[in-house]
Image: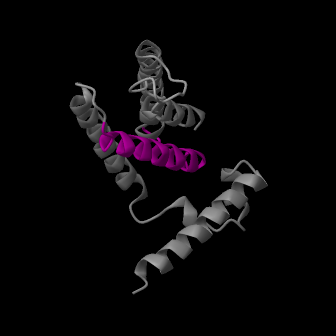
């Protein structure tokens, strides 16, 4: 999960829009020169590539092992997949003036499609959000961390509110 969080942060840095050079002398504000913006972009992109290799190999190891993912790995896999899916969806619809932006969006779309397919295969009709947290074995999935359980409970409540709001006439 930490690697998925890191990848999401790197995507955020890569997408961030540092202040651009001013148009003229009438506007006074600080800006990051193009060279610095480019260096940050290159560093973030390299970090994304490195994190992707690590995360995808870990997911492959845990999801496609002969024994299957195992119940103890399902929650971290679920969280990691959602983080990656949302990061790649954001990248697939991101607009930038970069010449390579189209190819990057296509690559992100392919990653998004692959991750959604894996997610669908693993969690078709179920979701960790609907687990009964009063059961001890489920509490174990959260590392017996009451903060994590509370956060998932809040998320479950908010999704319930969203469903009511989304289906209201």
Q: Who is closer to the viewer here, 16 or 66?
A: 16
Q: Who is closer to the viewer here, 145 or 158?
A: 158
> Relative to 23, does residue 112 appear above or below in the rendering?
below
Kindly give the residue lying farthest to the bottom in the view shown.
169
Quadrant where the C terminus is found in the figure: bottom left
Q: Residue at x 53, y 34 (%)?
A: 9
Q: Who is closer to the viewer here, 17 or 135?
A: 17
Q: Where residue 151 appears, x then y in whole percent?
A: 68, 57
Q: Residue at x 76, y 51 (%)?
A: 145
Q: Is residue 14 magenta?
A: no
**Residue 137 falls left or right of residue 38:** right
Residue 120 picture quarter: bottom left
Q: Tell me where the magenta segment starts and ends, as one range.
A: 66-95
Q: Where residue 57 appears, x then y in whole percent?
A: 43, 28
Q: What secondary structure characterizes most of the magenta part?
A: helix
> Relative to 74, does residue 34 appear above or below in the rendering?
above
> Relative to 111, does residue 28 appear above or below in the rendering?
above
Q: Where residue 21 appears, x then y in whole percent?
A: 43, 23
Q: Residue at x 40, y 24 (%)?
A: 24
């Amino acid at each position: 999960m930490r690697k998925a969080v890191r990848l999401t942060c790197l995507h955020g840095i890569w997408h961030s829009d540092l202040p651009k050079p001013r148009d003229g002398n009438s506007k006074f504000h600080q800006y990051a020169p193009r060279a610095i913006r480019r260096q940050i972009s290159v560093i973030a992109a390299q970090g994304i590539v490195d994190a992707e290799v690590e995360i995808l190999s870990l997911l492959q190891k845990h999801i496609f092992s002969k024994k299957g993912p195992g119940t103890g790995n399902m929650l971290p896999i679920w969280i990691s997949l959602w983080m990656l899916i949302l990061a790649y969806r954001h990248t697939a619809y991101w607009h930038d003036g970069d010449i390579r932006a189209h190819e990057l969006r296509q690559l992100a779309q392919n990653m998004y499609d692959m991750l959604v397919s894996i997610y669908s295969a693993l969690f078709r009709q179920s979701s960790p959000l609907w687990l009964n947290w009063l059961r001890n074995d489920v509490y174990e999935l959260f590392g017996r961390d009451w903060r994590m359980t509370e956060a998932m409970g809040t998320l479950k409540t908010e999704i319930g509110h969203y469903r009511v709001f989304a289906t209201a006439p």
